[in-house]
Image (tube, rainbow, N blue to C red):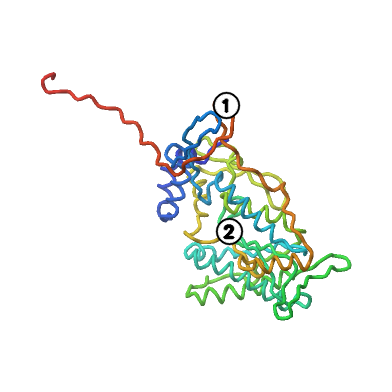
Amino acid sequence: MIRLSSIIETFEADFLALYQHKLSSDHYQTLAAMQRCRTEASPMMRVECPECDHHKLVPHSCGHRLCPHCQHHESQQWLERQLKKQVPAEYFLLTFTLPAEFRPLAWAHQSIVYDLLMRCCWETVHTFSRNDKQLQGTPGAIAVLHTNTRQLDYHPHVHLVMPAGAVDGKRKKWRTKRRGKAKGIYLFNHKALAKVFRAKMLAGIEAAGLTLPDRYPKEWVADCKSVGTGEKALVYLGRYLYRGVIREKDIVACKDGQVSFRYRNGKSGKMERRTVSGAHFLWLIVQHTLPKGFRRARNFGFLHPNCKRLIALLHVVLKFVPDPSAAWFKERAPVLCSCCGAVMVIVQTRLRPAPPEVVPVPIVSRESR
């Protein structure tokens, strides 16, 4: 497997020479964190064997959101929390895409535009749910911001996983969409969603004091499709929530100044390969660094973290018990003792790395010269 840290070490100089004018302090921190992740330069933790008292130092992971082999446990915890909030309704995956003409604006004002993007998506589905004849209430949604395509290009869009159900607070009712005769449950019209989303985004950008592009399309893109119980959609979103935009096993070649990686074509479903220069490959990854403190995953409506009592009440009233499948969860790999093979226990964390060994220079006295 080709490690991302080795690619950074190989092409860092070329990358900085070509893209230094585009980089912020956050980008530099991203590059440095992934380069020293789980190396001798990273903080260390001491592990000890309870059987034979053998101990050793193990490098910490960097924990950065773009690192491809970090925060696996956090991703599992997020997925487990979402599955515990399941309700008895068919789930839908909605996708709202920002047109290409707005990408320079989004790049220049990331915190503002990304926040607007997520809020306008929620406000759109909230409006549709309250006006829907069968729902007439407040829905719940799990929203995740993605800034990349499968080819790693810059492409801001938001995915929402939401059940086809709503809570009417005034009448204290739970309503769900009824199944049709032929096509099953129908949630919202994607063209109507895109039209309302467009209006809300344009109004929000102007209210934020930003300048709209000279030209932009009249018709925007939104998608709405059924995903059954929602488990697979949540697994898909959780996979890229904490663990970067590419897996290291998808980096297939690094030679002659170029890097090749594979990705799945969304239309054909087949694996394809893209080859770029090493410097450009680093830019494809680093450009997806989010502003510091920005929350790319948010829960809205009755799925908000403050609505735990409401979710528990729905489970009781509807006689529904969520069953988070254990198949989605993998235990954290244990550290095994090299002496007896027992599972080692972490006893200290965040220890400073040992300073590099310095070879002493012999002092030559004047008399011996």
Q: Residue at x 55, y 36 (%)?
A: 2
Q: Is residue 281 above or below residue 52?
A: below
Q: Quadrant of residue 218?
A: bottom right
Q: Is residue 194 above or below residue 361?
A: below
Q: Quadrant location of the C terminus?
A: top left
Query: On residue 326, which mark appears?
Result: none
Amino acid under disc 1: Cys
Q: Nearer the viewer, residue 214 or 60?
A: 60
* Residue 137 coordinates in the image, percent (x, y): 71, 76
Provide the residue designation for mark 1. Answer: 340
Q: Quadrant of residue 306?
A: bottom right
Q: Is residue 279 above or below residue 339?
A: below
* Residue 260 coordinates in the image, percent (x, y): 57, 41
Q: Nearer the viewer, residue 6 or 261?
A: 6
Q: Secondary structure at mark 1?
A: loop
* Residue 245 coordinates in the image, percent (x, y): 57, 50
Amino acid under disc 2: His
* Residue 44 coordinates in the image, percent (x, y): 45, 40
Residue at the extreme right of the image, as rendered = 181
Q: Quadrant location of the N terminus?
A: top right
Q: Residue at x 75, y 76 (%)?
A: 173
Provide the residue designation for mark 2. Answer: 155
Q: Secondary structure at mark 2?
A: strand
Q: Is residue 27 left or right of residue 344?
A: left
